[in-house]
Amino acid sequence: MAELSGTDQAVVVVGAGLAGAQCALKLRQGGWRGRIVLVGEEPHAPYDRPPLSKDVLLGKSDTTALDIDYANLGIEVLTGRRATGLTPGVLHTDGGDLPYGSLVIATGAVPRALPGAERAHLLHTLDDALALRALLRPGLRLVLVGAGWIGAEVSTAAREAGCEVTVVEAGPAPLPGALPTAIGSAMAAWYAEAGVDLRCGVGVAAVEPGAVLLADGSHLPADEVVVGIGARPATGWLAGSGVELDGTGAVVVDGHLRTALPGVFAAGDCVSYPSARAGGRLAVQHWDHALQSGEAAAAAVLGADAPPYDPVPYFWSEQFGRMVQYAGRHAEGDEPLWRGSPQDASWAVLWLRDGVPSALLTVDRPRDLTQGRKLIERGTALDPARAADPAVPLKSATA
């Protein structure tokens, strides 16, 4: 594939995940006639990540490539190229320098590793998923560190493959930090129903050959270990570039996803953006944000007259035969309203802030999610008594 010459004024998108691919696509569809170069560190064409812990692990698919005809669109895709630095007008990579007129940073996030756990597996790339799938077999003793979204989804697939699964979580319940303990505790029963040994309040000291050493000094037998304890922005390569990073390493952008450097934008999991809706900055590491921010970054590059980027955050997780969906962002002090009980086949929790919904968690209640997401978007006040009645459609519970 042809490289950029020093005189080319191209849009270079660094990071070939969903945000980067979506940005490149929308640039071309939005009327950009110049060169578009999409640079990815992995050897694969851009692909979707959510199926990695589902269809790929279960052997239902070997690839999750995005359905984009790059050649027909005139988008140059440079795979196997790692970004190493940035100076004004030039992206530096391990395969050479790429001059740009505009640059979009979309390098995403990378999983947090457990210190000293070199023997453990991470699940982030297609190659990670394929390697882990090859290990799953009946009777395999699999230990997962972290009862977050990845832990639950990998547990689901591993149990279907016949593995003996133990999940250890340092927090008091599944999804600590993401959900209040009362709600996470309601999900703990799903692990037991699936035959998964869930141990909360248990820290991991080290991963040893054939075992996991727990913080209390005991050993947990393990043929394989998977670590799922969150992710951090993949922005170390921006050191010294002048691009502002926050304390977590996320790229600081304005409401139109512009960095402080002229002509440099950012999108996806590596971004911290201002949210009037949330009353502060948000860093979101989910599929829907990658999709929407990739499109918003393209609009910003094109100079489109668009409102500030501030969608209602949304994500989903398929685990233990259930569809779990979450929209919005709850905060301490928001009033939680349960719609149904965790003992029901389906239920939801709605958070109200001064009578207005700020967030919604649903378990197999897709209609609640659809209606609740619109109410959050519009800032519609609700009647708490009616909103807490699972028999009342949320759209009919307005104040």
Image (cartoon, grey):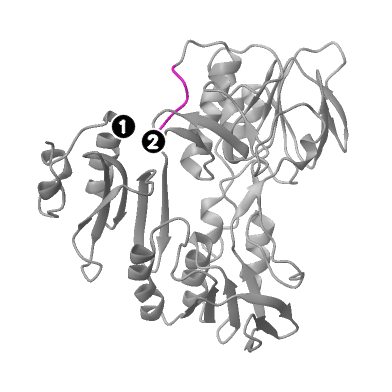
Give above or below for 393 relative to 290: below
Q: Is residue 108 left or right of residue 391?
A: right
Task: Report which quarter residue 61 is drawn in.
Answer: bottom right
The answer to whether the residue labelled 2 contacts the one labelled 1, judged by CB atoms less than 8 Å apart, is yes
- Give the residue number, with chain letter if any, for mark 2: 312
Q: Give the residues drawn in magenta, as a range.
A: 307-311
| Residue 44 percent location from the top left of the image | 70, 46
Estimate the x, y position of residue 155 in percent, counting from the top left.
50, 71
What type is the residue that disc 2 sits on? Val
* Within-10-Å neighbours for mark 2: few <14, some 14–19, many 20+: many
For mark 1, what is the residue? 377
Number of numbered tags placed on the structure image: 2
The answer to which of marks 2 and 1 sits earlier in the sequence is: 2
Residue 385 belongs to magenta span: no
* SS label for mark 2: loop
Instruction: Answer with the quarter of the image where residue 37 lies.
Output: top right
